Every structure is written in structure tokens, then in C-alpha cells.
Image: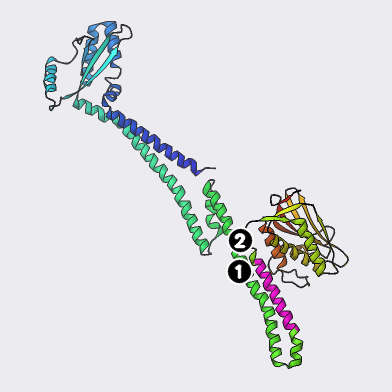
Amino acid sequence: MRSLFWRILASFWLAIALVAGLSILLGHMLNQDAWILSRHPGLHKLPEKWTTLYEEQGEGPAQAFLQNLKRKYHIDVQVLNDSGEAVIPGTFPPRAAAFEARQQKDDERPLPWRRLTAEYTSPKTSETYLLIYRIPHPELDAWHRESLLWPLSALGIALVVLTLFSLFVTLSITRPLSRLRGAVHDLGQTTYQQNSLAQLANRRDEFGVLANDFNRMGARLQSLIGSQRQLLRDVSHELRSPLARLRIALALAERGGPAEREKLWPRLTRECDRLEELISEILALARLDADMGDATPVDLPGLLYHLKAETELSSNDQTVSVDAQSGIQLQGWPNVLERALDNLLRNAVRFNPSGKPIELSARNEDAMLFISVRDQGPGVSEEHLAQLGEPFYRAPNQTAPGYGLGLAIAKRAAEKHGGSLVLENHPQGGFIASIVVPRDTGTAVG
């Protein structure tokens, strides 16, 4: 992954290196004596060269060496010993020495040359020599311009590189942010297109990961918005039927006499009950998307046996067998889970033939916990299995009463617990609906 972290870190390190280089350069400029002595081509290692020549070949070659230096670089040199006496005549004229002495008495009048000194101790004789250099200011200024050309050029190139690199890093951050901002705006206006961040999602850095996450979030939000719109359309469609029947019954009751009204009251009551049941199912489905607080431990075997008793009480011709490990628990919302399993059991009761038990079980398999309800009815055609669980969807061959919300509630409940609802035909016949949650949500204890 080409991380933005390393790009920004490299920029900072480059900036630090440039600042350090500039600091060193300024330091040399502030300490010009050391800078001149170490960098000037005529003075660089001059004491070592002169001392070696003087000690090996004598005064003549040493004096000639200094004269050649003056002709080439216009630098006058004096060499003194420990007693302050001249070792050789040197190249500094006596008149110039007298002029310098007079000028030193008057601090306000500058000298026309730069005076530098350097001490050197011979490694052979241990003799210490003091070399005094006098460089004319025009010569020194010309050398300064030449000597600073390379550092300043390098600094200028480094600044250009840093500017370009900083621009690249800045654009690599601001451009993706601008695209993400546009995508957020489009998402807020419900005009978001999933391919609007396709190019950004191909990046192999943090912005690419963020774009992929944003695409998934956008797709999920669009799916939820579409589901809500479809739910509203389905709700309005489902509510029209009982309301229309109520209107018809009321119109007949208004026109009819007392005897006819007595016959219509049970019908009105039945339609009101159906309408109340439908509204209750819709509200139960809507509540699953609300915040229900923290999850709590659920005594799953106790819940399953409670549902068994309730189901057998309401359906005298049906029996329910429970198969659950003792002490198995589920971390979740008991009311939500009870409502979901109750819907699955009622759905099973509609299709399960008399004399055969409905199987209610809870088992651990690998890293998952399965809570299953199996009936022994005719099952569902394979082409309709994928659509089961959608609000208000009912298989075409289903004749049992209902609004198609039971499985939708069970599906939302499973998702609320971090799992899913698995619907399939049992290999030995019948239909099985399973709420599957991770083992870190459902655990066996005791």
C-alpha cells in the first residue's frame, strides 16, 4: 500500500534536511574565518604544505611558494615562530605593515584587506608556526561569489524539489477529499452514483480504502432508501384492502335495516382485527431499526420451551419438539428474538400437517449458533426462496392467511443480532428457517 503516511513523512524529512543544510550554510557564513581557511583554494592546507616544504627544502623554496601564491591569488603571507620573529621574509611589504599598524590605531578606518591567522605545529620538529594571511577585499568578494554559487544552487534546486513534492502531496490529499465531498453532497441529495468514486477506489492507499468503504455505505444507504420507499408503497397497498372492505361494510350498514346491520357487525369486527394485526406487524418491523439499548443474556432453552407451550396452547392440533443444549445462552434482545421465533413458529403452524411435530432446536456448529424451526409441510419452490423475507412478499402458491411480514421481522431480528436468516427446504421434506448468529454472540455456558 502506498501510504499517505510515508509521503507526508518523506516531505517532513526533506524539509528538515533542507533546514539543516541552510543552517549549516548560515553557520559557515557567520563564522567566515573558518569558512575561508577551509574552503579557499589558496589557503586550504597551506600550513601543512608550507611547513613540509620549509623543513625539507629550506627557506628559498618556501619563500618561492609564498610568492607563487601571491601571484595566483593576490594573498600576502607572513610566517612567524614562537618568539614572534619572521621565519622567512614572506610577501607582506614593510610599508603595508606600517600602514596596517597606523590603521589599527584608528578603529573607524577599515583596512583594504581581510586579515586571517592560522597556527600549525610540525609533526616532525614540534615547531609551531603562525601564518598571517592578508586577502584584498575585491579578491575575497570574487571568491565568495564563486564559493557560494554551488551551495545556493543546490539549495535552490532542493527548494524547487520540495515545492513540487509538497504540491504533489497536497494534491494527492485535496483532490480525493474534493471527490469525497462531492460524493457526500450527492448522497445527501439522493443522486449518488456508485461509479462516481470508481477511480478513487482503485488507489492503493488510505483514500482507496475510504472510497471502497464509502461506496459500500452509499450502496447500503441507497438499498435502505429503496427498501423504505418500497415498504411505504407496500404498506399503502396492504392498508387499502381492509380499509376498502370497511368502507363497503359501513355503506351497507347505513343502507340496511337493523337485521342486516346485526349480520354486518361480525364482518366489521373481523376487518378491524385484520387492520390492527397488520398495523401491529408493521410497527414491529419498524421498531427493529430503532435503538433498543444494550444487549442482555437470553436463556435460550427457557425461551424455546416457553414458545413451545404458547404454540401448543394456541394450536391444539400441533405439537412442538424442542432440542436445545442445556445452559446455552444468547447475548441479545429477548423480546426481539421471541417475536422473531414466534413468527417462524406461526408460519410453520400454517403449513405443518396434523400429527407431525414442529421441530424447534438450538445447536452450535463451528463458529455459529443455529436456532431453527422446521415444519413438515410441502416446502417452497426453489425460485421463490431468495425473495422470502422481503416485506409483504408471499409465495404465489401460499394460501394461508398472512401479510408477508413474519419472515421479514425474523430476518431483521437476525440482522439485529449480527447474523442472518437462512431459509431452505429440508432434505427429508418440509421447510426449515434458521436464525444464524456468530458464536461470540451466542455461547454455550454451564
Identified by mark 1, the residue type is Arg
Q: Image quadrant for the N terminus?
A: top right
Compared to residue 354, the image places residue 64 above or below, namely: above
Q: Is residue 155 visible?
A: yes
Label placed on residue 291: 2
Q: Residue at x 74, y 72 (%)?
A: 402
Asked which secondary structure carries label 1, the reply is helix
Q: Is residue 165 left or right of residue 381?
A: left
Instruction: Give the magenta range.
Output: 266-285
| Prevailing secondary structure of the magenta residues | helix
Contact between labelled residues 1 and 2, with CB atoms less than 8 Å apart:
no
User: Is residue 104 or residue 317 the one in the foreground?
Assistant: 317
Q: Quadrant of residue 390?
A: bottom right
User: Is residue 115 or residue 84 the one in the foreground?
Assistant: 84
Q: Quadrant of residue 391?
A: bottom right
Q: Position of residue 99 (x, y in %)?
A: 11, 20
> Which residue carries the number 1 mark?
229
Q: Residue at x 29, y 19 (%)?
A: 44
How far separated are the C-alphas under marks 2 and 1? 21 Å
Does residue 95 belong to the magenta stretch? no
Label placed on residue 170: none
Mark 1 nearby-residue class (10 Å; few <14, some 14–19, many ≥20): few
Q: Position of residue 290 (x, y in %)?
A: 61, 63
Q: Is residue 364 left or right of residue 218?
A: right
Q: Residue at x 75, y 68 (%)?
A: 395
